[in-house]
Image: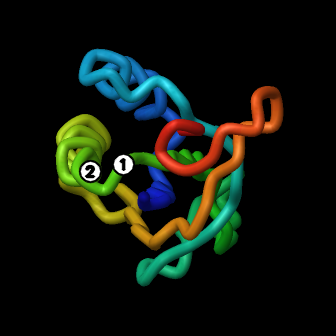
Amino acid sequence: MKKIVTIIRPDKLEDVKQALEEIGCLGMTVKEVKGRGIQLGITESYRGTDYKVDLLPKTQVEIVAKTEEVEKIVDTIVKNAQTGCIGDGKIFISPVEEVVRIRTGERGEDAI
């Protein structure tokens, strides 16, 4: 099993969520977060005064999936979150040792 943590633009969440549902990926956790990448934020102007916004609003989506489903999920996220501009986000994939469904006590892939 793998955990997929995706940081995307907030305006792309609905596109990504709908596309994931279409491929059968239903379970996810979504968080509103702030962060920055290599662009180190943006500079904006308000009434003639420039100011730097170094932590931009982003959306974090976490998914735990079977290892064989990871590539399809990642491809779907990239296809639907990509704008081609700096700040599109990142995807992090890490192993998951165990999953336990609290309601039934099921473990492993059956608990996803």
Between 102 and 16, the residue placed more toward the observer is: 102
Please say if 77 is above or below 20: below
Give the percent coordinates (x, y) of residue 47: 70, 52
Q: Earlier in the sequence, mark 1 or mark 2?
A: 1
Secondary structure state at the residue bearing disc 2? helix
Between 41 and 82, the residue placed more toward the observer is: 82
Q: Residue at x 53, y 81 (%)?
A: 40
Q: Amino acid at mark 1?
A: Lys
In the drawing, what numbered circle is on residue 90? none
Instruction: Specify few, some or many for label 1: CA neighbours under 10 Å numbering under 14, 14-19, or 20 or more.
Output: some
Residue tagged 2? 74
Q: CA distance from mark 1 to mark 2?
A: 12 Å
Residue tagged 1? 66
Q: Residue at x 23, y 51 (%)?
A: 68
Q: Residue at x 28, y 43 (%)?
A: 73
Please say if 72 is above or below 26: below
Left or right relative to 30: residue 69: left
Q: Amino acid at mark 2?
A: Val
